[in-house]
Amino acid sequence: MGLFLDRLRHRRAWRRYQRHPQPQPQLEKLLQVPWPQGNTLWDQASWLAIDLETTGLEPQEGYIISIGWVAIEEGRVKLESARHLLIDSANLVGDSATIHHIRDRDLAAGVPLADALLALASALTGRLAIMHHKPLDEGFLKLAFQEQFGLDWVQPAADTLALERRRMARREAGIHQGALRLGSCRRRYRLPDYPAHNALDDAIACAELFIAQARHVSAAGPRVSQCLS
């Protein structure tokens, strides 16, 4: 039912965007190219792991300062597809620099947010998204696409945090503080530690975690509809 409702929202978003006075070709294509069907095996679908670095946890108070992504095709991470974009902004990063280590002078060499979003839209066309803690990144993307282009963000996504929480609940495993952080989830699948708070590193880490989670389900792995949240 979730993917069916996403498709309805997708069609409504496309109808609304057709009335836009200056439509962007990348966004038109994003809204026109169909997603994989819900009964498709996970490794026969195309995915894009996405991570954002932001200056806060609330979209209305913070802003996006970097975006990283990498594709998964045929159940494998495609490193040649990886992108990491810093976002040029007139705003200051403030105390958040102590977390993501991105400085104001780094952002001065970045790209406009609109350009970064269009590049992301092109990479996401025909693919399903993957995020770790989907509500956080999705909240920033929804606001950014709406403010920059008047576009409703309706892309279905798998949430590796939600998938891990579900797996632990089935095993009746206690979920202690920090157990669902990206690094903690990866260690349970014996994946190596990566530096945290870099959008591209986190996107690759999220992609690898998703593959490990899918392979843990069964030999064939889950269907697309079982992965989405």
Image (cartoon, rainbow, N blue to C red):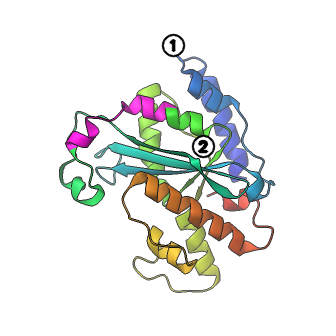
Residue where numbered disc 1 is placed: 21
Comes first in the chain, label 2 or label 1 = 1
Residue 151 x, y percent position in the rendering = 51, 30
Residue 214 x, y percent position in the rendering = 68, 67
Residue 45, above or below 109:
below
Amino acid at the residue labelled 2? Gln
User: Is 26 left or right of 197, judged from the image as shown?
Assistant: right
Residue 149 x, y percent position in the rendering = 46, 26
Residue 111 within the magenta-colored segment of the rendering: yes
Number of numbered discs overlaid on the protein picture: 2
User: Main SS of the magenta segment?
Assistant: helix
Which numbered dot is residue 139?
Answer: none
- Within-10-Å neighbours for mark 2: few <14, some 14–19, many 20+: many
- As drawn, the residue found furthest toward the front would be 80
Q: Residue drawn 33% across and 35% down?
A: 110
Residue 152, above or below 192:
above
Amino acid at the residue labelled 1? Pro
Q: Residue drawn 51% across and 14% down?
A: 22
- As drawn, the residue found furthest toward the top would be 21
Q: CA distance from mark 2 to mark 1?
A: 23 Å
User: Start and end of the magenta stretch?
Assistant: 104-118
Q: Secondary structure at mark 2?
A: loop
Q: Is residue 173 visible?
A: yes
Quadrant housing residue 105: top left
Residue 187 x, y percent position in the rendering = 51, 78
Q: Residue drawn 79% across and 72% down?
A: 219
Residue where numbered disc 2 is placed: 155
